[in-house]
Image (cartoon, grey):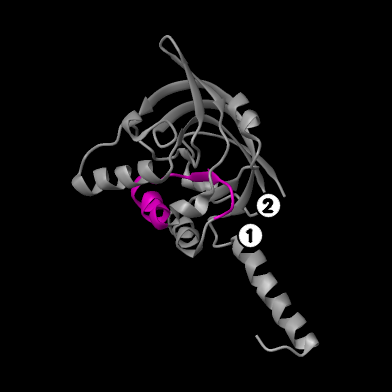
């Protein structure tokens, strides 16, 4: 296990250094994106329309932040991770089309995302659920908000962060997925237990 500190935009070469169980801290620009932001971004891509931000080399945070506005200034109050499996249907195309290097969330992602990360050079960084205040403290500035018509949680919040983390690398760019490994081991253990008990599955 190694600690890394990267600043965006992050290169594919840097990402390929990371392995599962490494710890990553990110500084620079990152953005939030949940279901609706993923859907709209991919629709824009198919239509040949430009996004409000070049996503290449950035980190996408599965998060619906709580945000306060004072005059013309936005402040992130809490920024806990959203369950990432909701974005599994989008994430492979999102990584392929936009060259996002880090996906941040909780709960892990599946085979499609794992394969896309291996093909295009990206990783999944697991952030602790329930640590929304810790995440908010790493946000130095809200650079802008895009697609606010989707609602505060679903909008794309573009953030300037410093030492955002710790993120545990749970899916690396070499096809390793800690969540899938745990699931596979659990199934193997279940089979052994059933056999010892003389039960059929």
Asked if residue 188 is positioned above or below residue 200 in the image, the reply reads: above
Position of 110 compared to 163: left or right?
Answer: left
Label 1 packing within 10 angstroms: few (<14), some (14-19), many (20+): some
Residue ID for mark 1: 178
Instruction: Give the mark, 2 or 1, whose residue is nearer the N terminus.
Output: 2
User: Which quarter of the figure has residue 166?
Assistant: top right
Is 102 in front, or is 137? 137
Q: Which span is picked out in magenta?
A: 89-108
Q: Secondary structure at mark 2?
A: loop
Give residue 104's position: percent from left, percent from top: 54, 43
Numbered label attached to residue 87: none
**What residue do we see at 39% from left, 33% from top?**
155
Residue ID for mark 2: 21
Label 2 packing within 10 angstroms: few (<14), some (14-19), many (20+): some
- Residue 133 falls within the magenta-colored stretch: no
**What residue do we see at 51% from left, 50% from top?**
84
Give residue 77's position: percent from left, percent from top: 56, 24
Q: Residue furthest right?
A: 196
Give residue 64's position: percent from left, percent from top: 48, 36
């Amino acid at each position: 296990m190694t600690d890394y500190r990267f600043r965006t935009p992050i290169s594919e070469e840097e990402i390929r250094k990371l392995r599962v169980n490494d710890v990553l801290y990110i500084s620079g620009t990152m953005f939030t994106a949940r279901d609706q932001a993923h859907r709209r971004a991919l629709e824009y891509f198919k239509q040949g329309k430009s996004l409000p931000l070049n996503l290449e080399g950035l980190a996408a945070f599965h998060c619906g932040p709580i945000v306060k506005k004072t005059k013309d200034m936005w402040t992130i109050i809490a920024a806990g991770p959203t369950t990432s499996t909701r974005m599994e249907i989008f994430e492979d195309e999102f990584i392929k089309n936009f060259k996002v290097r880090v996906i941040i969330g909780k709960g892990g992602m599946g085979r499609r995302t794992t394969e896309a990360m291996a093909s295009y050079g990206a990783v999944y960084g697991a952030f602790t659920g329930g640590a929304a205040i810790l995440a908010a403290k790493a946000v130095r500035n809200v650079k802008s908000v895009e697609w606010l018509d989707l609602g505060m949680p679903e909008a794309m919040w573009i953030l300037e962060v410093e030492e955002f983390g710790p993120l545990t690398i749970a899916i690396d760019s070499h096809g390793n997925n800690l969540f899938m490994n745990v699931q596979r081991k659990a199934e193997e253990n279940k089979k052994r237990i059933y056999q010892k008990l003389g039960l059929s599955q």
